[in-house]
Image (cartoon, coloured by chain):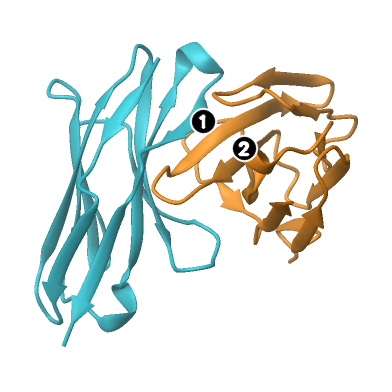
Amino acid sequence: GQSLEQPSEVTAVEGAIVQINCTYQTSGFYGLSWYQQHDGGAPTFLSYNALDGLEETGRFSSFLSRSDSYGYLLLQELQMKDSASYFCAVRDSTSGYALNFGKGTSLLVTP
Amino acid sequence: NAGVTQTPKFQVLKTGQSMTLQCAQDMNHEYMSWYRQDPGMGLRLIHYSVGAGITDQGEVPNGYNVSRSTTEDFPLRLLSAAPSQTSVYFCASSYLPTGKNTEAFFGQGTRLTVV
């Protein structure tokens, strides 16, 4: 089976940088994704890492270390609208490449 | 572009009733899946499909059936609703995740209450 661990809550100040960590255990790792979900809304895709290293998309970056089964999402220049839940998710080749999610990190950005 | 469309948006059922949650996508995605989201539990996979005629179980399949007769549609059937199935249900679609583009697109969700 799979398991993903991420912090349940993070609070940061507007304009700051925040890092949300994710550790995973899976038998057929195929890639780590990050999704954002605002209250009452649908999850939306942020980034994907299949190989070790950093992927940058505007203010958001995502990092993966396959040897450590670890990744993180880095949010820079935080804005109030970044207050949301952030989910890491892995695809596992042993379960039909299904996308399996962590329980999510609730990010609160304060003025 | 419609993307992924789920209907209904809200539903109240009585215990023991059955119903079908509809999901349709217009992006020609091969891969479709259903999740339920409960407070503090993240999104849990119910069933998924890698193409028309092919379905498989996810983490929490009990009490749910699916079928995939076309590429576009992936309905989720609740056979005999129970209060434990009160949840928000999301349908998602993507290209087959063995390619480089693994982004999943989600519908707006169906908020189901079973009384």
For the point 59% across and 43% down, the residue is B36
Q: Nearer the viewer, residue A90 or A85?
A: A85
Residue A65 on image: x %, y % = 15, 30
Amino acid found under the numbered disc labelled 2: Tyr
Q: Nearer the viewer, residue B98 or B47?
A: B47
Which residue in the protein does label 2 denote?
A: B95
Q: Which mark is residue B99?
A: 1
Residue B2 higher or lower than B67, as above or below: below
State which chain disc 2 sits on: B
Q: Colour of chain B?
A: orange
Q: Is residue A36 left or right of residue B72?
A: left
Residue A52 higher or lower than B57, as above or below: below
Which quadrant would residue B113 be assigned to in this image?
Answer: bottom right
Q: Is residue B68 left or right of residue A65?
A: right
Residue A70 on image: x %, y % = 17, 32
For the point 88% across and 34% down, the residue is B70
Q: Residues within 10 Å of mark 1 (few under 14, many from 20)?
A: few
Residue B15 on image: x %, y % = 80, 42
Q: Residues within 10 Å of mark 2 (few under 14, many from 20)?
A: some
- The chain painted cyan is A
Q: Nearer the viewer, residue A14 or A56?
A: A14
